[in-house]
Image: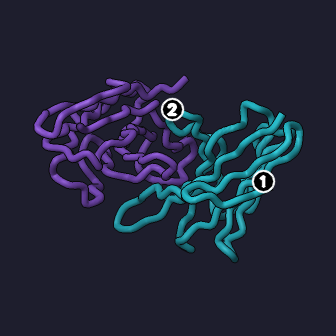
Chain colours: A purple, B cyan
Amino acid sequence: DTEVTQTPKHLVMGMTNKKSLKCEQHMGHRAMYWYKQKAKKPPELMFVYSYEKLSINESVPSRFSPECPNSSLLNLHLHALQPEDSALYLCASSLSSAPGVSGNTIYFGEGSWLTVV
Amino acid sequence: GESVGLHLPTLSVQEGDNSIINCAYSNSASDYFIWYKQESGKGPQFIIDIRSNMDKRQGQRVTVLLNKTVKHLSLQIAATQPGDSAVYFCAEITQAGTYKYIFGTGTRLKVLA
């Protein structure tokens, strides 16, 4: 079972709505990630937080706003989304954001299925 | 056999046979690679990793091979089982200012009974 928990599992929202996706991990990981995945496509990196600071923003539109309240929580605030933003949003975490460190695998949650209508 | 669909390459193998899933990566400077398995409706699950200073690593029923000369990664699954049916992604870790995990296009593995 995954140790990265995402809520909600499914979300349907209108283009004028404001909603949030939530992610939680209690593995002591200090790097947390948001990925977007469309059907039959690989996950695409959106944001990376390292030690609760935003370290990577992959030119994501401002209608997606990440927040890292503490080392265990990661939120993705959604506002004025478009239908093409409908996708599976994956949260992940790793010990740190430095690769190749022993045990520094990225662990994914089950994802939040977002539908924008 | 192996076929390339419109969006996702598919590999069909008989139960009990060995599977080989291939991945070409883009950045010769990438120094860490991971294979993930993603079942329908679930998030990617870690299978095995390998560092660039290695050319082979074995796990339980899985082996990853790395050929840096041609920037190629493969995942071998021994005695493929129905539970192995999933989409498999390779990921390379590359540095562009800071480290990024970049996923390959993925391969769907179908295990035939």
Pointer 2 local density, CA inside 10 Å: few below 14, some 14–19, many at least 20: few
Q: Amino acid at mark 2?
A: Gly
What's the mark number on residue B20?
Answer: 1
Residue at the spot 29% in from the left edge and 55% down from the top edge: A56
Label 1, secondary structure: give it. Answer: strand
Position of residue B93 measured from the top left corner of the image (x, y, whole percent): 50, 59
> Disc 1 or disc 2, which is closer to the eye?
2
Position of residue A54 measured from the top left corner of the image (x, y, whole percent): 24, 49
Left or right side of B12 for A110: left
Position of residue A98 measured from the top left corner of the image (x, y, whole percent): 44, 53
What's the mark number on residue B39?
Answer: none
- On-image quarter of the C terminus of chain B: top right
Instruction: Tell me whether marks 1 and 2 sit on the same chain.
Output: yes
> The disc numbered 1 marks a residue on which chain?
B
What residue would you read off at disc 2? B41
Image height check: is B109 above or below A69? below
Q: Amino acid at mark 1?
A: Ile
In terms of depth relative to the viewer, which is nearer, B107 or A73? Answer: B107
Answer with the quarter of the image where residue A61 lies: bottom left
